Image (cartoon, coloured by chain):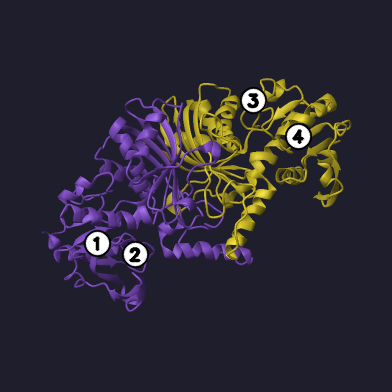
Chain colours: A purple, B yellow
């Protein structure tokens, strides 16, 4: 009755979260395959009270698989996703490898589930910092039109992977012991510091992470005229990305209008009563599925401008959960070829 | 040959930094008085290789004082600054108590030293997050006119004082030991978290800290038409505020124009070669006097728009150093009544 699912990159921070999410959401599976590099083969991962044994990822891994959730890095996806598609599986790819391909839908299920209808075997999961922003802004865009976004992010180290999480822990411990700090995952010390540098720099002075927020937002919202200016910053937080989002609407709107939209928006939880110190923080969102919005206020510095503070668990909604939700929506729409009724 | 100086709130994070700054800059003093609450009287503070003994702050503390550097909290300044002025001293006040009074100059020496000329005994030192922003933007404002600023901050815990610094340390240690985290200086855990809440909330949904960035920027730059939208956020950094600053100029400018202005701007150090991972971080600026600017780039999302990343030591340029520089400028301009030649 269930689907045959494979998780590519199962031992990574997002891969483990994918297994956990399948379990927590009682995703219907008849089999779950954990795929990773040869180095991790034989390793056991907890799943539904038991274990799955990690298998080596090869081009022949997908014969008996209907859905692949992939999060093993862009180069791995580029190499192996086509084999999975050729074997008839649908691949939900969490890497940036195919996101801007015009043949590949880029989907946030609360926002553009209809884009799944034209998939050709491959669906991209957007970047974590983009997902939470569009979950919050999509209903506003539909009602009033988003004209411009100026966003600054406060991104957790887990977005960079499990080694980066360990690096923050190791740095804090080294500093406690008065020992030298080692930097591998990040160019400089991240403990007690903020680094305005996520992913590589492009020629225009922006990082790839920043350009993802520009280009992916437009693709997901299906509107190439939306202007986005992003500054993406790594902060010493383990889990949960926060975003300071300034946006301007095309049509006039009030804070009450926008709050009303957000209150009923799917996947959004408004957490906004500043005088009682109610606003979301990364810690509040750890392990939660929703995108939390607080600090909503008019910005008198420009016409139809507003500020808000958007927080979500980067490993859940920003990665694993969104991927599993895409698989759920594919089932609902009967869009999984091998499982077609 | 030197001045008779008193430091009000000498035992606090900024007070200690004021003593250190007087020492490091060889500020000419004939006497230095360390004033604090009765509780701290008798305590010894290191100064110029020796010590100063803390005296209790009273209304009679200022008879023999020419310059007061005050950083003991707004209510203390409100109570004692008038007594110091009455005694003929010039007070450089680091609190927000008098900043928006029209009779009180609000001064960043690199930006508006001329405003010292009309002082009536009391000069306000601006808010830390404002100082570093205007140091970077003032030369751009003069050349091209700043029309609008959208700023999101990443502010160190030391901005809240010495107890807040200890609180971050204690929380990290409690988490290491698996013990409950105590929150006193901050409403929620700051360790491994970001809090979009600095100072109290006003009715408009902004914090006082955010409104300081709006109102003080206008007063310092002497232009009430500059639009500012601020989101101020506390991050788990000990020292050094970072700011993601998006700004629009009135007249067209290029990145090269702006870089050239910043390269020669007083108090500014450009640190901007992203492809070589050169950009400022809070750790780089710890104990440094300059305001560092990096990540300068055009923002194609609006006309004449730019982004940059501005970092400075909040206890130095953001507080103690700016106050001492004001005292230096008062000397240079012969504006210290008791010391008038």
Residue hosting label 2: A15
Residue hosting label 3: B100
Relative to A146, residue A211 above or below = below
Q: Nearer the viewer, mark 1 or mark 3?
A: 3
In this orientation, which residue lies closer to the viewer: A189 or B181?
A: B181
State the image quarter where residue B180 is shown: bottom right
Residue B135 in the image, given as x and y percentages of width and height? 58, 35
Relative to A261, residue B284 above or below = below
Residue A27 in the image, given as x and y percentages of width and height? 27, 61
Please determine if labels 1 and 2 lie on a single subunit: yes
Residue hosting label 4: B76
Relative to B284, A205 lies left or right: left
- Which circle's residue, 1 or 2, is located before the other in the chain? 2
Question: Pointer 1 indicates a residue of which chain?
Answer: A
State the image quarter where residue B10 is shown: top right
Q: Nearer the viewer, mark 1 or mark 4?
A: 4
Which label belongs to residue A78? 1
Label 1, label 2: how many angstroms apart (C-alpha)?
17 Å
Please determine if labels 2 and 4 lie on a single subunit: no
Residue B309 in the image, given as x and y percentages of width and height? 49, 42
Residue A327 in the image, given as x and y percentages of width and height? 24, 57
């Amino acid at each position: 009755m269930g689907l045959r699912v494979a998780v590519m990159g199962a031992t990574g921070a997002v891969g483990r979260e994918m297994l956990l999410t399948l379990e927590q959401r009682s995703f219907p599976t008849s089999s779950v395959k954990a795929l990773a590099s040869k180095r991790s083969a034989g390793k056991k991962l907890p799943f539904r009270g038991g274990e799955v044994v990690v298998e080596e990822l090869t081009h022949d891994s997908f014969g008996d698989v209907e859905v692949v959730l992939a999060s093993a890095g862009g180069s791995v996806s580029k190499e192996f996703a086509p084999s999975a598609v050729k074997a008839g599986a649908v691949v939900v790819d969490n890497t940036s490898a195919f996101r801007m391909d015009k043949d590949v839908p880029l989907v946030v299920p609360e926002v553009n589930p209809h884009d799944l209808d034209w998939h050709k075997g491959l669906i991209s999961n957007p970047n974590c910092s983009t997902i939470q922003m569009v979950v919050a802004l999509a209903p506003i865009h539909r009602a009033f039109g988003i004209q411009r976004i100026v966003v600054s992010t406060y991104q957790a180290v887990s977005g960079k992977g499990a080694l980066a999480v360990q690096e923050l822990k190791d740095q804090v411990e080294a500093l406690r012991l008065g020992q030298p700090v080692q930097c591998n995952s990040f160019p400089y010390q991240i403990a007690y510091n903020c680094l305005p540098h996520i992913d590589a720099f492009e020629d225009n002075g922006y990082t790839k992470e920043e350009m993802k927020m520009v280009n992916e937002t437009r693709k997901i919202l299906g509107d190439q005229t939306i202007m986005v200016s992003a500054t993406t910053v790594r902060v010493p937080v383990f889990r949960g990305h926060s975003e300071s989002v300034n946006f301007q609407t095309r049509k006039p709107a009030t804070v009450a209008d926008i709050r009303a939209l957000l209150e009923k928006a799917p996947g959004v939880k408004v957490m906004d009563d500043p005088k009682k110190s109610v606003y979301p923080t990364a810690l509040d969102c750890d392990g939660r599925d929703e995108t939390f919005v607080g600090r909503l206020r008019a910005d008198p510095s420009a016409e139809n401008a507003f500020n808000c503070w958007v927080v979500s668990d980067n490993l859940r909604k920003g990665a694993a959960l969104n991927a599993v939700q895409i698989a759920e929506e594919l089932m609902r729409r009967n869009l999984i070829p091998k499982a077609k009724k």
